[in-house]
Image (cartoon, rainbow, N blue to C red):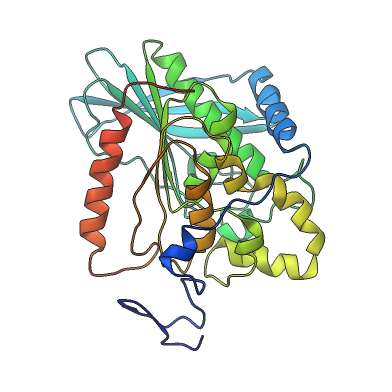
Amino acid sequence: MNGGASHPGFAHGFDFDPACGCSEAELLAIAPPSAPPGFDAFWMDAFAIWARLEKKLTYVPLPSPSSRHALVRVDADAWEGIRIGAWLVAPVSGKVVRGVVVGHGYGGRSGPDLREPEPGTAIIYPCAPGFDLSARVDLPSVSDQHVLHGIATRDSYLIRACVASMWSAASVLMDRYPGITHLSYEGGSFGGGLGALALPWDARFHSAALIVPTFGHHPWRLRCPSIGSGEAVRRYHRDHPQVMEVLAFYDAATAAARIRIPTLVAPARFDPAVAPPGQFAVANALVHRKLLVLSAGHFAYPAQAQEEASLRAAIDGWQQLPGRGG
C-alpha cells in the first residue's frame, strides 16, 4: 500500500499495511505452522544442556527507591560461555511466595520497572545476551543485527541462548526464594516470543502473559514488511532462503502449541514492528488461554493508555492465579 494508507481508525505514513491485509476474523483463524521433525527433541536437549550448566549466581545489593523493596543486581550463567545480568526487586519483609520473570522488548532495558510489586512477590528483570547488563563486545545490541546473529544454523543461533536466559532468571528466583509456590512469566514483543519458546520445556512455571509476541509463524512473518527485527530476517531470507530450515526451530507459534499452563495473550490487530499474523498464530496455538486483542502494537493511538491500563490490570490479576499446570 502507498504511504498514508489507513487501517480502521488509524491513519499512518508507512509504505506497507501494518495489518498485513488481514481482518480480525482472518487473524483469529491463523493456525501455527507444523513443527519440523526433531523440533521437540531440539528444545528438550537445549533445556537439558542448560540444566547441566553451573549457574554461578552472584548477588549485589543496590540502592532502592523504596523502603519496602530491595533492589539487587544478579548475574548468572545462561548458556555455554554466556553470562547474563538482571535486576531483582523483592519485598524487604514477609515471605515471598510468588515470582515473576519479565522479558524485555528488542530495545533492551535500561533498568527495572519500579512499580510496586504485590505483597509476597519478587520480580526479576533479566537482560537478554547482548543487551544492557548482559552486553558483550562480541554480541550485537541492535535488534536488526541481534536477530541475525548466528542464524546460519539452529545450533549457533543466538536466540537459543536468549531463551535459556529466561530459564536462568527463573533459577535466580527459586534459589533466592525457595518458598515460591507460583512462578509466572511476562514478556512483550521480543520478550513475548522468548517466553513462548521457553515455557513448554520448563515445568517450574505456572502461568504466563505474552504481549504482542514476536517470532510467530515465520512463513507469514517473511511475507510482511515491517520496521522491526522481522524486516532484517525478511531481507536476509531473500538472499538465504535456506534459513527457513533454521527459523522453523525458532517459531514461537509452533512452540506455543506445546504450552500447557494458563496463558494470557494480547496480540495486536495493527502493528508496524511485529506482523499481526505472527502474533495471532501464537495466540491461536495456545491450549489454555485468556485472549485480549489490542487495537495496535508499537504504535501510538487514541485508546492506547486505556487499553494498556486494562491490560496491566489483567496481567496483575493473572499472575495471582493459583498454580495449576497440566
Q: Residue at x 30, y 40 (%)?
A: 315
Q: Is residue 231 left or right of residue 126?
A: right
The vertical placement of 159 against 167, above or below, is below
Q: Is residue 293 left or right of residue 94?
A: right
Farthest residue in the left direction? 67
* Residue 289 picture quarter: top left
Q: Residue at x 58, y 46 (%)?
A: 252
Near-viewer residue (65 or 301): 301
Instruction: Give the total number of marks visible in the rendering.
Output: 0
Q: Residue 152 placed where, x, y %? A: 79, 52
Q: Is residue 59 left or right of residue 229?
A: left
The vertical placement of 11 against 50, above or below, is below
Near-viewer residue (242 or 131): 242
Q: Residue at x 68, y 56 (%)?
A: 148
* Residue 45 picture quarter: top right
Q: Residue 251 placed where, x, y %? A: 63, 48
Judge whether residue 274 can be spotted in this image.
no
Q: Residue 310 placed where, x, y %? A: 23, 49
Q: Is residue 125 left or right of residue 281?
A: left
Near-viewer residue (275 or 92): 275
Q: Residue 111 placed where, x, y %? A: 37, 43
Judge whether residue 94 can be spotted in this image.
yes
